[in-house]
Amino acid sequence: QLQLVESGGGLVQPGGSLRLSCAASGFTLNYNVVGWFRQAPGKEREGVSCISSSGGSTNYADSVKGRFTISRDNAKNTVYLQMNSLKPEDTDIYYCAARNRLKPACAMRGYEYYYWGQGTQVTVSS
């Protein structure tokens, strides 16, 4: 069964850091563009970041530039999202997603992704 599984979410104080992981099972993630998205109930989904299959190309939403870093370890079949200087407005459910491997371009819109994880909650609060 093809799955993406996020982990690393939790409760953190403003200014703190978290590292989210997105691990693939049932398929190799090495040839897929991977994106991170976030969405709270009743809110629109927002593209946070994406990374090309090689890791050589990345993109970030303006709201997280300079604070978040996306990376991948293809040997571990895992993509990471390092989140620093967290703010209360970063509170959301975070999802990772993978594009079809025939789609090599980094993308920030959810409808361009085929595989999705179940999400991990990030709460930034004092």
Image (cartoon, rainbow, N blue to C red):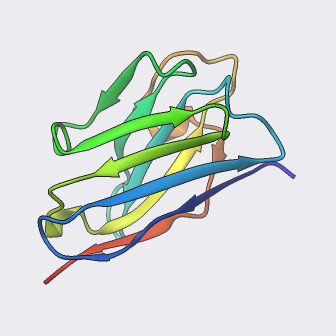
Q: Nearer the viewer, residue 109 or 59?
A: 59
State the image coordinates of residue 68 (x, y, percent, origin top left): 26, 44
Picture quadrant of residue 85 = bottom left
> Residue 72, relative to residue 78: is it above or below?
above
Instruction: Look at 51% across and 53% down and name the residue there.
Output: 21
Q: Nearer the viewer, residue 72 or 60?
A: 72
Left or right, 71 with reference to 65: right
> Residue 36, relative to residue 56: is it above or below?
below
**Quadrant, the C terminus:** bottom left
> Residue 99, relative to residue 77: is it above or below?
above
Left or right, 2 with reference to 37: right
Q: Residue furthest bottom?
A: 126
Instruction: Look at 58% across and 15% down and name the residue there.
Output: 104
State the image coordinates of residue 19 (x, y, percent, origin top left): 39, 56
State the image coordinates of residue 71 (x, y, percent, origin top left): 44, 35
Q: Nearer the viewer, residue 38 or 58?
A: 58
How many marks do you count on the picture? 0
Instruction: Look at 17% across and 65% down and name the residue there.
Output: 89
Instruction: Look at 34% across and 56% down and name the residue there.
Output: 44
State the image coordinates of residue 63 (x, y, percent, origin top left): 16, 45
Q: Residue furthest front?
A: 75
